[in-house]
Amino acid sequence: MGFSARGAFSAALALSLAAAGGAQAAPTLVVDMDSGQVLHQEDATRSWYPASLTKLMTAYVALKAVREGRMTLNSPLRVSARASKMAPSKMGFKPGTEVTLDNALKMLMVKSANDIAVAIAEGVSGSVEGFAGEMNRAAANLGMRESHFVNPNGLPSEAQVTSARDMAVLGRALYREFPEQAGLFNIGALKLGNRVMPTHNGILGRYPGADGMKTGFTCAAGFNVVASANNGGRRLITVVMGAPSAADRTIQAMALFDKGFASGGGQGSLAGLPSSGVGAAPNMREEICKRRGKSVAMPVESEDMATPLQTGLAQDLAHNPERAFLFSQGGGASSGAIASAGGVPRLGPRPQFEPVPVFIGRAPGYEGAPTAVARGRAGGSKATAYAGQKSDEAASPLAPDSSAQSLRGRTRAAGKSLKPAAAADDDAPKAKPQKPKAKAKADASKAKAGAKDKAEKVAAKPKPKAKPKAEQDDE
């Protein structure tokens, strides 16, 4: 369809999305890949939780390590006990499982595996904490002024924040610095044995020219995406943060692509956008998860299928026939991927992708360096508040004027009360020293009595409620 029709579609949809936004307006941005010119932006430098958009930085640091000769794509990584304990989404590999960096990166981008993110971090830097340091140094070098990282997967942490602008900067850097790895962000599905894993990115296969990059979701962050599309040799990167559902995220990104490709000029450079630095991000849990009740317990992928959008967007279109007409007739550049039934918009079914095969174990014939494994925490530090350690994404919000320094300070303070996760080199059982028989007998009696007292206390103590699955999931 022509750009004039696209413009009508985008204008109508923009009004609808604004009505659906609720109390928290979602930051958005569209940038021209080559020139770095901003074609659209709304609150693009506002602090936001990245969720699994974090994994774009994890991929960047890992690919940088390959470029520097510190490892290769065939370097085997070993899944540690710490990695295996990560919350879903995950591959679920047992400790000791080996996977090449190449396969790990594919699992990271498509399955958005939180355990694999930790395996990559430990393999590249020796520890999650050391890797977080590399992430922050890379962010600073790239000019990402609103970002701070404490983990490689985006599981909830009050101190891990970014912005739409920073994610666009990172997306451009990945394509510009590692063009040979562009296909990593365009995989529609993976196959491991008989297991097929589709991408969470609902834009792939629905929007012509869409070729990446990454989605993210937590209750605190909402539904995020960094998307890329190529039209006639011109590539745009679109960022949407805090959408109310996966389907809204996909539709909004499509509309922003339409707007960007129809645009003839820019609004200045990414670097020229005013920044207040690293700050506190809003917690979207109340809007995204709690108010939606049982519906949020659905698998994240199902929200991006051909189901009606029960959101403010759908309600707005249902009560404004002229907008619903434009929506159904305009269709955007999505070539029928968006349809309208009774005034309620919905996405068409996902296309069937030919899955890319991946495997566990070393690459055939690999004779390189020993397996990259965790070497313990950097400097023996116990201070980093890592999300895999039962951290609560609903922790008290930081003050609005929190700086990068104060965020890090709070992280260190919080870390003192956390029990450190076991390092990978502690996975093997350790031999216990032998005790004299009399002392061993007395110790056994004492331990038995202590165990009885402990069991009575545990039985009397009310069990904590299980955390809803959807509050752990991260795309």
Image: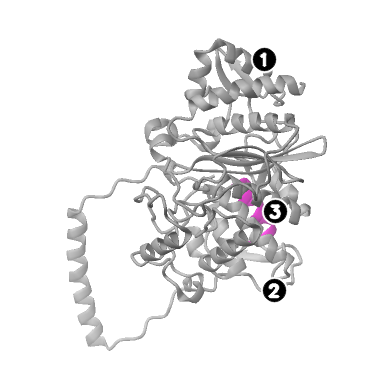
Give the foreground label among 1 and 2.
1
**Circle 3: element type:** helix
Mark 2 touching mark 3, by CB under 8 A? no
Q: Is residue 179 left or right of residue 129?
A: right
| Three-letter code for the amino acid on which mark 2 is drawn | Ala
Instruction: Please report whichever mark, 2 or 3, sits nearer to the chain's N-terminal start.
Output: 3
Q: Quadrant of the C terminus?
A: top right
Residue that label 1 marks: 329
Residue 57 is a magenta residue: no
Residue in the picture at 41% in, 80% down? 431
Residue that label 3 marks: 173
Instruction: Identify the residue at the far right of this view.
Output: 232
Q: Is residue 6 above or below residue 84?
A: above
Instruction: Please report whichever mark, 1 or 2, sits nearer to the chain's N-terminal start.
Output: 1
Residue 99 is a magenta residue: yes
**Circle 1: element type:** helix
Residue that label 2 marks: 369
Q: Which residues are magenta?
A: 98-111
Q: Is residue 230 left or right of residue 146?
A: right
Mark 3 touching mark 1, by CB under 8 A? no
* Tally of marks: 3
Q: Quadrant of the N terminus?
A: top right
**Circle 2: element type:** loop
